[in-house]
Image (cartoon, grey):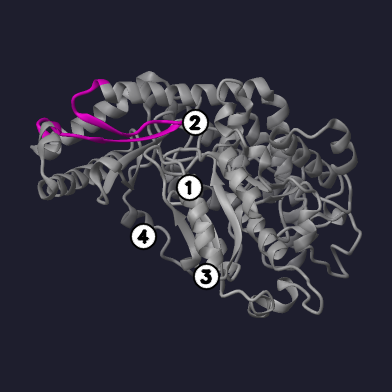
Amino acid sequence: MVRDLFLNKKKASADYETLRRVFTAPEGRSSTLSHIEKEISKNIQRFLSQHIVSGDADPEELERNFKNTSIPEEPIFVSEQADFLLSKVVSQSVHTSSPSFIGHMTSALPYFMLSLGKIMTGLNQNLVKIETSKAFTPLERQVIAMLHHLIYHFSADYYQKTAQDRYNSLGVFCSGGTVANITSLWVARNRLLGPDGDFRGVSNDGVYRALRHYNLEGLAVLVSKLGHYSLSKSCDILGVGKRHLVAVDTDHEGRVNVDSLEKEIHLLREAKIGIVGVVGIAGTTETGHVDPLADMAKVCRRQGCYFHIDASWGGPTLFSEKHKSLLNGIDQADSVSIDAHKQLYVPMGAGLALFRDHQNLSLIEQHAQYVIRSGSRDLGKRSLEGSRPGMAMMVHSALHVLGRKGYELLIDHGIGLAKTLAGMILESDDFELTTEPTLNILTYRYIPPGFKDALSDAGEEQLRNLNQRLNQITVAIQKTQRANGKTFVSRTQLELPQYGDQRIDVFRTVLANPLTDESILKMVLDEQRQIAAELHD
């Protein structure tokens, strides 16, 4: 009977004794679901050979497949659910492993991640508490220490003392860069508004009493105009207020202007605004630019400000001997966020917040008597999220299977490919490079014949009209290219120095897939040319 349930000869019934057998693990249990795995593997090969990045259903058609919102009263066959997933979900998913999918920060995964995913799901460890994770807890601490060392370069003796110390933490795993940024600024806020005399600190007495106690009119976080939207979320959640996320001017290379940063700090202090933190960016989401981190660190030390670096995208650049100097100064940050599910090439749901001072996470420590008790080894007492999966196993495996040299090859390939694409655009008559690549992200747009000369000769009003028309063309090409499903780039809006304060729609490419090569880049540009010609006709 139990075997039959998993071989789809019978479906479960709603009586308890029969239903509970679905939760056992007999031999042969995966006969149906393995069919899905085989189809995914076949599809991946097809996507690679035919350059397909998505199914052909339009959004309205897809929505019709998911209109039924009632929960079934009776169990169904596993095979029925598998058929639904294959026909309605798998076949119409976005194939992020495709080498011609170069529009977002999601890429192909090493083949062994699928097997590791099975192990992680089967073990179902919960990293909030050592009673539900055991070996995974020291494993996670080890991975955190490995990446902490990549950034901060402390001595081997330091990590021997701190990596597994139950009373301190070098960092914390979380679901991604957003939670890592929130966690880092949470620590920064609690450090700024900590206990003082009868005041028990903002975490106990709240923001209102904290401001009164410290004679402040408000709080602020400073970041460049290209800061990630998660920082706005952080300000909302932490009581800073989204309006008090201060956007600092950038230079023509998209890097924060350090003089403007220091000026903003002085203005805020004069207005009695407490500075929760200054955020530097190591790889902006839209353009891949890197702030002058070392100079920002000096300003923060001079002004006594907490310095956080959002390295969610660009952190792994540190693996490259050739390019790691782009992140000079990152080791001076009080905290750094990094996304493992981006350029560490593990599945979605893995980010880290790493702290220079191993005692800083105690500023947000929470306890409960049934779990995460004071003095325990439990990791959940210093994380925003409670229940968490064992993603550290994925990162640990990737770090060992790929190694430093493997990651260096991946990083160098991506940055080199971005420079290759930039060269192709600069040599063409019908494309404009809108941002030079620093890392492996760049932006550009299509320029129809005759428009380049018109742009160079145009007055202010004519220039605005021409750019509005080009914005329409960019949006139309990108939407059509996405609908075609053969190649994909994303799009965004930027303020470019040569066009004043006008918002310019541009194509955005992210070149992190090791399967992408120069022939794919040529195919992307050729398809955009073809779409433009068809739109013109």
Dot 1 corresponds to which residue? 259
- Under mark 3, the amino acid is Ala
**Magenta highlight on residue 447:** yes
Q: Is residue 215 above or below residue 259?
A: below
Q: CA distance from mark 3 to mark 2?
A: 44 Å
- Under mark 2, the amino acid is Ala
Nearer the viewer's eye, disc 4 or disc 1? Answer: 1
Identify which residue, 286 or 368, lies in the foreground: 286
Determine the residue positioned at 81% across, 53% down: 359
**Residue stretch rendered in magenta on the structure:** 427-452
Q: Quadrant of residue 445?
A: top left
Nearer the viewer's eye, disc 3 or disc 2? Answer: 3
Dot 4 corresponds to which residue? 64
**Magenta highlight on residue 91:** no
Query: Would residue 534 be found to the left or right of residue 85 on screen?
Result: left
Q: Quadrant of residue 103?
A: top left
Secondary structure of the residue carrying numbered label 4 = helix
Nearer the viewer's eye, disc 2 or disc 1? Answer: 1
Query: Would residue 450 be found to the left or right of residue 517 on screen?
Result: left
Q: CA distance from mark 3 to mark 4?
A: 54 Å
- Whichever of labels 3 and 2 marks the residue nearer the N terminus, that label is 3
Q: CA distance from mark 2 to mark 4?
A: 34 Å
